[in-house]
Amino acid sequence: MNIKKILTKPWSFVWGGFLVGLAEVIYFVKYETPIPITTGLAKMFASIEENITKTEYIARLYDADIHWIIIGILLGAFLVAILEREHKAWAKYPLRMAFLAFIGGATFGLGTRIAQGCTTWHYLGGIPAMSLTSIVVALVSVPFAFLAFMFMTKLDVAGYMKHHEKHATVKHCIGLEYPNDTLCYDPKYKPYKDPLRIVLTAFLFLLLASAFYTAFKGESAEGIGRLPWIEIFLKTFVGFLLGFGIGKTGFGTECAVMAPHSIHMSQKHFDSMKVAKITQTMFTGLMPFTALMVAIVMFNIAILVMWIFFGRDIPVVVEAGRYKYGFHLGHLVGGPLLGIGAVLMIGCEVMTYARASMGYLTGLASLPGFFFGYLPFTLYREKFEEIFFSKGIIEARNMLELLPDNPYIRYGFAFCYTGILISLLVWSIRKGSQTVKVSPKEYLTESTDEIFLKGLEAEELKVKN
């Protein structure tokens, strides 16, 4: 297969996970911390207040700035749309889906403030760093993500929950008895005449223009002239890897943690919820879970290598702040908000940026939702801290701090932890490939759409025979 064909077709989830993991490793080696995302968007919102609205709702807590990682995510995902010659503006969503995405953005945004980070921070950063807090955030978010998914089924919109809308795949499903796979297809839809899309796209451009204006002024921490060009490039490149990997696969953290439960769901259950057939393939094939485990294992091994051989500290993903607790009530409340918000947005925060750049209406609608999600926290920060952060549960910030201060015990635990992660990765590849009836090689190299279409062809051939 030549390079051109590789770049112009969707990828297996596995390679999306690889690029995300590579981005985490590169950032950690340089900055000794997982990739920060959500506070960067708050600073970009603050730039609008500083440059345009002259208000201080977000800016009272966050300084106006640009976040080069977010810029990189947008660039990476947009390049995918160019290479594949398919901007996702063709996908038509009803107004209620845009509204749900907006509510999801607000819910997720508030959740990031209370849980001290988004799902990317906790799942991709905290779990590799052996953070008990992040594991708990992930666990408590899953049941609420399922509740949100069930809510979507009650609204008869579960068919819109897909990793990507691929034009060729959707057109292939036309004429088949798969109506939930073609919901977004309307040959009469003119996205450039959709007033809501125009307004939301204008908001995205306004956000970018304001952030770049702040950057060029050179007064902010990430501004041009203050931050060295090599660091601007590195942060943008890290974001680019995230955006490109997500754009090529549709990888999102919320789908990843929900996928293992789906292997116990019957076909009748899926059909009753009106879940798209390709989404069933993705979930039961454990594809997003495998991608998540690839990224987690890569980052975890990098952390161990830097810790054991180079004396680096295990990164801390939860700060106690003025309170002494590394695990507090906020994590138990914020986790469910993250799960609910991610499902309503059809993607976690990083995936939302990628989807917005690729032209998905739901991705565009989620962005202003984040602004309103941040507002309660920025307006009443002290009250939030008193309610959520002062109610401590555990002081330790990662699981190693719960163990005796003995290097052999801690090394032993770390190796066992890594072994469990690798075992989960191997299991997901074996189980996923068996469920969707492809070889492990096909599972690792072919996209969800390719595997789904192979399944359709097999069914059609079976019917003919």
Image (cartoon, grey):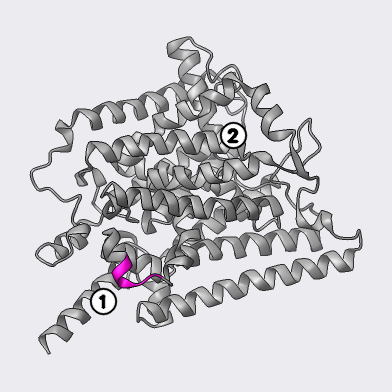
Q: What residue type is labelled 2?
A: Arg
- Residue at 57% x, 45% y is 335
Q: Position of residue 10 (x, y in %)?
A: 32, 62
Q: Quadrant of residue 272?
A: bottom left
Residue 455, disc: 1
Most foreground residue, 64 or 392 = 392
Residue 397 location, x and y as percent?
Answer: 76, 48
Vertical side of 152 occupied by 386: above or below: above
Left or right placement of residue 58 versus residue 326 in this view: left
Asked if residue 275 shows in the view, the reply is no
Does 358 sit left or right of 148 as displayed? left
Please provide percent x and percent y for residue 426. Answer: 55, 76
In the image, residue 58 lies at what x, y percent?
A: 54, 20
SS class, disc 2: helix
Residue type (three-letter) at the residue carrying disc 1: Gly
Magenta region, residue range = 265-269
Q: The residue tagged with tag 1: helix, strand or loop?
A: helix
Q: Which residue lies furthest to the top in this view?
A: 54
Residue with the mark numbered 2: 113
Q: Is residue 268 magenta?
A: yes
Depth check: 377 or 168 in front?
A: 377
